[in-house]
Image (spheres, helix red, strand yellow):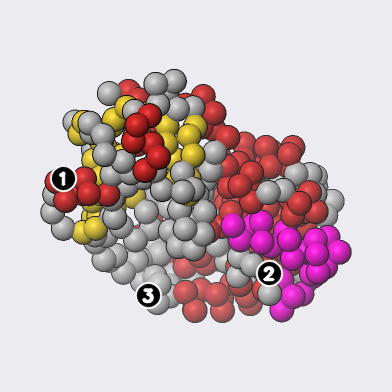
Amino acid sequence: MTTTHASRLLAWYDRHRRTLPWRAAAGKRADPYHVWLSEIMLQQTTVATVGDYFRRFLGRWPTVDALARAPLDDVLSAWAGLGYYARARNLHACADVVAGRHGGLFPQDDAGLRTLPGVGAYTAAAIRAIAFDQPASAVDGNVERVIARLFAIETPLPDAKAEIKARAAKLVPQQRPGDYAQAMMDLGATVCVPRRPRCVICPLMAGCKARKLGLAEELPRRAPKAAKPTRRGLAFVLARKDGAILLRKRPAKGLLGGMDEVPSSPWREGKFVADQAMGAAPVPARWQILDGLVRHTFTHFHLELTVARATATTGRLAELAPGTTWCTVDRMTERALPTVMRKVIAHAVGN
Ligand code: SF4
């Protein structure tokens, strides 16, 4: 299957490859910096969303050295909206290591790549294959689906991962492994799609077991996910007379680490009690609790924030905790504000 599989897929890729901002022209080798940057951005985020961010990052920081020299806050604010901010902190840390310890050149081997912050097995394989044309097997969600179907693997995910990886690795050709990796990704994204796979136009149709068994649409199976808990809290939007809003910085480690936020009570599961939560207000003020909730979903929990708003009076401002700053609404885009906080501010300003 291997030779036929690879040659059919590559022939298809030569005709149908997607044009992507980080992808090199046919026959050219991609810049490792572009490959790495796009792969980090694409984790948990769609190609359509990543395109603009990728272009903006490259416009601002055309090389890994330039990115390493950028202040972390600038990187975090440019990242705002992509979510999973640990990735942005790792991105900056990784640029620092590549620029400082590797002379601005990405390592080419698995061991070297995996010492870099934020680079795991998948990203290392993707960089090796796409940037250095090495026969590395990069199995992302798209490829996982294609392999599960090709071999009609009925074990549900995540248990099926090891088998899928082993099968995928055996298929990687020695010729054009970089194009092969991208071809598998493209096939999963455009033909072997999650719902209604387009088997009739698929270059791998002849050897696909799921198609023969009529199982294509059902695979890969997934073990049921545990329900996410819901945490609740009270967010405080304190506005000065000139419209500037009080922000503080979150601790460097943990969820949304190092990002800006409006002050809030701790986010806890269980019933929300406004009087209790009010104890976390940044200053005593005439807090008005607004109607409605701001909802946001993180990887491990749903969040429901009630929003309280008040106007700052100069008399009480001396009581503000150190490290808080004021920011006008029109300058918010320059701040490293996560999406949930943008929603909170929009809720307070719009109400
Ligand atoms: Fe996917 Fe259908 Fe192609 Fe099989 S034949 S790989 S199920 S698109």
The residue range painted magenta reads: 89-113
Answer yes or no: is residue 276 visible.
yes
Mark in front: 1 vs 2? 1
Name the spot of residue 44 as percent of width and height, x first: 49, 54
Circle 1 packing at 10 Å, graded few (<14), some (14-19), many (20+), is: some
The residue positioned 13% from the left and 54% from the top of the image is: 271
Q: Badge 2 is on which residue?
A: 116
- Pointer 1 residue: 274
Residue at screen point 40% across, 40% down: 318
At label 3, the amino acid type is: Thr
Q: Nearer the viewer, residue 80 or 290?
A: 290
Judge the density around disc 2: few (<14), some (14-19), many (≥20) Cα neighbours within 10 Å. many
Q: Secondary structure at mark 3?
A: loop
Give the residue at mark 3.
155
Which sits in the foreground, 54 or 238?
Answer: 238
Asked if residue 221 lies left or right of residue 72, the reply is left
Front disc: 2 or 3: 2
Residue at mark 1: C-beta within 8 A of ligand 1: no
Q: What's the CA distance linking mark 3 and mark 1?
A: 47 Å
Task: For marks 2 and 3, give the CA distance.
Answer: 33 Å
